[in-house]
Image (spheres, rainbow, N blue to C red):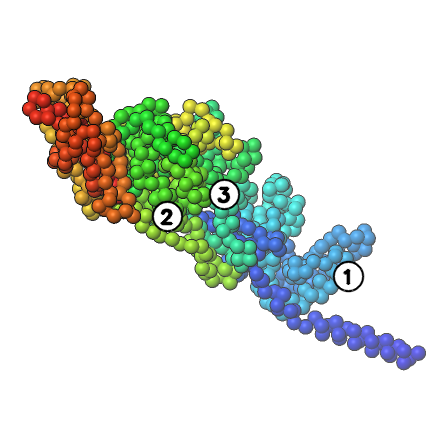
Amino acid sequence: MRNRRRALLFGVLVLVIGVTGSLYLPFPKSKLDPGPVLSLRITDRNGVLLREVLSDEGGRCRWVGLGEVSPHLIRATLVSEDRNFFLHKGVNIPSVIRALLQNLRSGRIISGASTISQQVVRNLGRRPRTLLSKLFEAWLAVRLENTLSKEEILAQYLNRVPYGNLAQGAEAASRLYFDKPCSQLGPAEAAFLAGIPRSPSASNPYRDFPAALRRQKEILQAMARRGLITAEEYHRTAFEDIRVSPEADRFRAPHFCDLILGSLKGPQRYRLSEVRTTLDYGLQKKVEVLLSRHLDSLREKGITNGSVIVLDNDGGDVLALAGSCDFFDSRHDGQVNGALALRQPGSALKPFTYALALERGMTAASVIDDAPYAFPTLEGNYEPQNYDRKFHGPIRMRSALACSYNVPAVAVLEAIGPDLLYRRLKDLGFDSLRKSPGFYGLGLTLGNGEVSLLELAGAYAALARGGRFQTDRTVIRMTGENGKDVPIPGPERAVDVFSPGAAFIITNILSDGDARVPSFGYRSPFNLPFPCAAKTGTSKDYRDNWTIGYTPRQTVGVWVGNFDGKPMHDVSGITGCGPLFRDIMLLLNAKDPPPPFAEPRGLVRRSICPLSGRLARALCPGRMDEIFISGTEPREVCWTSHGAGAGPGLTTASISEAPSRPEPVLRIVFPREGGIFKIDPVLRKEYQMIGLKAERSGVDGPRTIEWWVNGRMAGTSASPSGLSWKLAPGSYTIKAASGTGVLRIESRPVRIIVIT
Ligand SMILES: [Zn+2]
C-alpha cells in the first residue's frame, strides 16, 4: 500500500518535473524561419503595385522586421489581442482559467483567450480546435517564450497572422488595404488593421466595412482608456476618413500583367518575389480613361473596343498598354488583349515599302502614276483601288504616301519585289507574318498579312530611332525570393533595318501636314503643336482602324474595332482612332514639347517643281523644298511646258514661251509613264536592258527615231523596232523624236524610275 502510494507520488513527481522541464526545451527554430516568399509582386516602373500573384500556398506574405512596422500598429495590436503581452510567459493563467470554466459550462469552445504567443504557435500548424490541442498549444507557447524574446515573438505574430482576403502578415495587409508599406500607417489605419485578425471574415473590409470600422473604434477607445492616446488624439483619429483601396485596384493594367506573367516560366515565377516592369501606371490610368471616353463616342459607328500602346523610343520600354476598354466586360470580350490580337493593318505597312524604295534610288520627288492598273499575279490580275475610289494620276512619292494611295504603293512594291519587303518586316519584329512571302504577294504593302498592334508600334519606333529596330522591353528588374536580382530572360535584339536617311525622309513625310491635305483635309487630328509622324490604316471591309505614330520621344499605337470581327461604319483614320491618338500625344507632350526630329548626315535639299519633281525653274507653277539622300537628288531642270490649267503658278511668260508644237503623232509605247524598274542583283549589269519602243501614226515608211533620255541623245532606232537601253539607278525622262525642221515630231515624254 505504502509502496504503491510512494510509486504514485514518484510518478507524479517525475511527470511534473518532466512537463516543467519540457517547457524549457527550445522551440524548433527552423519552424520560425520567414520561409519562402509566398507571392510575386508585379509593380510599375515607380514601384506602384499592379498585381500580386499568389503561390500555391495561397497567401500574400511579405516579411518585415519589427522596426519596419508602424508603432501605432504595434500598440493597437497589443491592445486588441494581448494587453498583458509583456507580463505573461506565453499563457495568461487567469484568462485561461476563466475560459476553461466558460467552456466547461457550455460544453464547447467559445472563448479563445489566446495570447499573441499562442496565436503564433497556432499559425505555425493547423490543429483541430479541441481542448487537448489548446493545451498542446499553450505548452508550445511557453516553449516559444523561453526561446524567443518578446520582440521576436511580436514580429512572428505580425508577419504570420491572417488579415483576410488572403493577406498574410501586416505588410501584405497594409499594401492590400491601404496601398502603402505598414511602416507608414497612421493611428486610424493602424487601429483599423489591428482589428481584422480577431475575425478576418466578419471584419472583412470588402464585405462588411461598417463592422471593420466598429472594431476600429473599439480599439481606439481601449487605447484611449489605457492612456496610449490622448482624448484629443482619440477624437481626431476616430473621425478620420478611412479609405480602403478598391478591390479592382488589385488588378491594375490587367492585360499588361498577364503579358508579364505569360513571359515567366512556371517554376521561375515562384522563385521570384518582385518584377519591376516598365509600365508607368500614372500614364496607364490616363490612357485607360481616354480610351474609354473615345469609345463612348464611337459606339454609334458600331465600334465596341480598342487598344492603346505607348512605347518609349529610347529603350523600347512599354509605358502603357491597354488591351481592351474594360477587362471585366465579358459582353465585348474584354479579356482579349487587343494589343496582341492579329489583324490586318491596312495601309499601316506602306511607310516600310517606301523606305525600301528610298534606299534603292527612288526619292520623295519621284513621280509615280496613280492610274488603273492590273498587276499580274499567280491568282490572276490584281487591280488595287484607292480608298476614295478615284485615281489621281502622276503623283510624287511624298503625296502618294501622305495621302495613302494604294496603286503607287503596289507599283513600288512590284518594282522592289515583295520578298524584300517581307524580309525587312521580319527584321522589324513582325513575327506574326508566318506564311511565305509568296502567300502575301503585292498585297503585303496594303496590309493583307495579320500583325499585332505591339508589332506595329515596335516597327514605327524603329523609324523614330532612325531605322534601328529594338525589341520592346517590359521588365526593368526581377528580384528573387532571396532578395537578389535575377537575370531578365528573353532575347534582346537590336538591328539597323533602314538607313538613317531613308527613315528620316519617311518621318518627314509622315509628319508633313501639308502633304496629307488632299486626303485628310486641313483640320486633320494629326496636326499637332509639335513634330509628330502619324499613319492611319483601315483593313478590308472596315473591320479595323489603326493610327500609329511617333514623336522623337514616344511611339503611340491605337486600334479600334470589334473583337468579334464585326465591321464598323463611316470610319476613317480621322473619324476612328485619330482623335484618340491625338489626345494621347497631347497628354504625353503638351507640357514639355519634344524637340524636332534629328536629321542625320548625308541628306541634301533641293527646290523642286511640285508637278515634275525636277529642279524648279521660273516657269514652273510653284516650287517646294524636298529632301534627298545625297546622290539621289535631281540634276535636271524641270522640262515640262506647264500648259494652261497646269497649276496656279502659271504666268503669261510661260504661255508665250510654250512652243506651239504639232500634236505628236509619235508615241512611246514602252516604257509606260511612271514605270518603276528594278535592277536584278543576280544578272550581270550589261544584261540589264529594256527595249524602248515607239509607235508612229500618220507617217508612212520606216523612219529613224531618236531617243532622248534626260535631255541627252541615248541612241537611235529604226521604227518599228526599238532601242535597247541599259538600266542604271535614277529618274529618267524619255522622249522620242523623228524628222527634222518643220517635219520634226516629238513624243510626249515618259518618266520612269530605276531602282537597285
Ligand atoms: Zn515644272
Q: Nearer the viewer, residue 749 or 403?
A: 749
Classify mark 1: helix, strand or loop.
helix
Instruction: Please provide percent x and percent y for residue 117.
Output: 65, 61
Q: Residue drawn 64% across and 69% down?
A: 28
The residue nearer to you, when weighing 507 against 498, is 498
Residues 43 and 167: in front is 43
Mark positioned earlier in the residue sequence (3 or 1): 1
Specify the label residue 132 is tagged with: 1
User: In the image, is 259 to the left or to the right of 226?
Assistant: left
Task: Give how far across and how far down residue 744 sits, in percent.
Answer: 10, 24
What secondary structure is found at the residue carrying circle 2? helix
* Dot 3 amino acid type: His
Q: Quadrant of residue 321?
A: top left
Determine which residue is flagged by label 2.
Answer: 427
Residues at circles 2 and 3 in contact by the CB criterion of under 8 Å: no
Mark 2 CB lies closer than 8 A to ligand 1: no
Residue 564, label in figure: none
Quadrant of image for the N terminus: bottom right
Task: Give residue 255's mark.
Answer: 3
Disc 2 residue type (three-letter): Asp
Q: Residue at x 37, y 48 (%)?
A: 427
Q: CA distance from mark 3 to mark 1?
A: 50 Å
